[in-house]
Amino acid sequence: MKHLLSAADLSHKQAVRILDTAGQMAATQAREIKKLPTLRGRTVVNLFFEDSTRTRISFETAAKRLSADVINFSAKGSSVSKGESLKDTALTLQAMGADAVVIRHHASGAPHTLAHSGWTHGAVVNAGDGMHQHPTQALLDAYTLRRHLTGAGDPSGRDLAGLRVAIVGDVLHSRVARSNVQLLHTLGADVTLVAPPTLVPVGVDAWPAEVSYDLDAAIDTKPDAIMMLRVQRERMSSAGGGFFPSPLEYTRNYGLDARRLAAMPEHAIVLHPGPMNRGLEISAEAADSPRAVIVEQVANGVAVRMAVLYLLLSGSGATTETNETKVDA
Amino acid sequence: MSSALPDKMPDARPDETSSDQQPADATVVLGGQEISRALTRIAHEILERNKGGSDVVLLGIPTRGLPLARRLAAKLAAVEPTLQAADLVGSLDVTMYRDDLAHHPTRTIGSTDLPGDGLDGKVVVLVDDVLFSGRTIRAALDAISDLGRPRAVQLAALVDRGHRELPIRADFVGKNLPTSTHERVRVLLEETDGRDAVLIEGGAR
């Protein structure tokens, strides 16, 4: 694994390995001294062309906990606002010796271009590109699902076989949904997408997921987890952008409220990638209920990103496939 | 599992235990009996040196240090009935503290589990299978200092094969095994490999 660009690139084995490594990373984060010397002397650049709170902070925290040097770059206030291209920005970072570039970009495919253009020799990690992919979010969701839903004891080595996950909301604009459908499918879970027909992308029948237009019917099928997506108002023209008649109607049909929460199975958990629109796709009762693992998702994000940075940066660049077996019990 | 050498840990310790099959020139230097006797002796030495085992914590370094630590704990508990074997043992993964991460394929991280009351004020006995360059132990000492402040740290190794690259020595040794650098020392244990043996392979000719 040289880069992490898309959840679709991950094999079952690689995905489980990342989750297992994240488990060990999470264990170190419960200690008093959380910093590890593992990536001492390496440089990680956070290249953010789009606004972000938790993803950028999460990557920054992950890199710092592994003792890497972190350079934060955001398009606002940089030469990008003077018209500098992605290529020239990347060449500048290369000249500064970046070992890994974590990139978020509004254009789908920007991380792929960066990884395959020869502009940088470092590992490229996709932290969200356009409406395409957000693989580390899918990994932290999978990690959270595995921790809660695959039974007691150490979950190392397990996948998500047989779990049923409903992903609800603005699937059309959501890179989180795309990455999750692919990763959760790879790990053996059954995914149902629930959205108004206007927010389901063209070509969804080719995805390894079911599609439903009715949230109550989807909840009646007793999913093990429900993942609420944010209504991405910045990608829509007005309040509903013509995708739904009014926010109130969206909330009535696709919002997770106390009644729907009560209709879910006892063990089922609620995920949300954040930031939440409280009162729109999720009510305060649902967001603050003990079954919501939304805050834990953020903590797990640091562990998962530590695992990704470790696996991309620590080796000699030789193949990692020889070392796939699990260490001890 | 029992006949050929299994390749359970292809890259756990490349400098000591990495080849996949037992070559024709492998020599068995310790068998199951000798390993057991060596561990019994080490257990008594640990108790003698520390005047009992009340503050002792045995930290095994994965992969093969951990089963050795468990066996030592069982032997300590057999000698001193006040001790509970399970409370004495922990595992200490040193992967993230190694100084050679950039020179090998990515290593899988093992788990670190400390016994109940942590390490502060305890006597930590590090347990590993082969003591060679000393770099693993250097990494383990760094790892320990991030986990707590033991009163003392001691080192037990089943085999000391020499060729130290750092000022580190073992307090308890199962067997000193003079080797040349191009030989390989492999420790096989029932728990990980299906049988107990210490082999030297390569070299000779």
Image (cartoon, grey):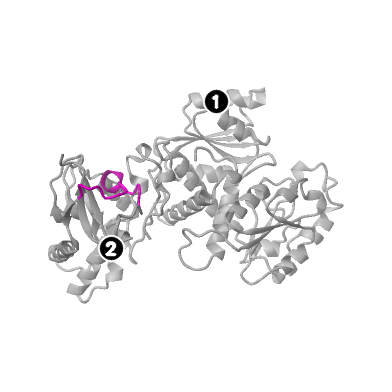
Task: Tell me if A156 is positioned left or right of A9 in this view.
Answer: left
Picture quadrant of residue B5 = bottom left
Residue at 57%, 30% in the rendered image: A116
Indicate yes or no whether the magenta region holds residue B20: yes
Indicate the secondary structure of the residue bearing disc 2: helix
* Mark carried by residue A119: 1
Residue at 30%, 44% in the rendered image: B14
Q: Give the amino acid at mark 2.
A: Glu
* Mark carried by residue B190: 2
Residue A201: image x %, image y %?
A: 76, 47
Q: Residues within 10 Å of mark 1 (few under 14, many from 20)?
A: some
Q: CA distance from mark 2 to mark 1?
A: 51 Å
Q: Nearer the viewer, residue A219 or A244?
A: A219
Name, please, the residue furthest toward the front.
B24
Which residues are drawn in magenta?
B9-26
Task: Tell me if B151 is positioned left or right of A96 in this view.
Answer: left
Q: Give the amino acid at mark 1.
A: Trp
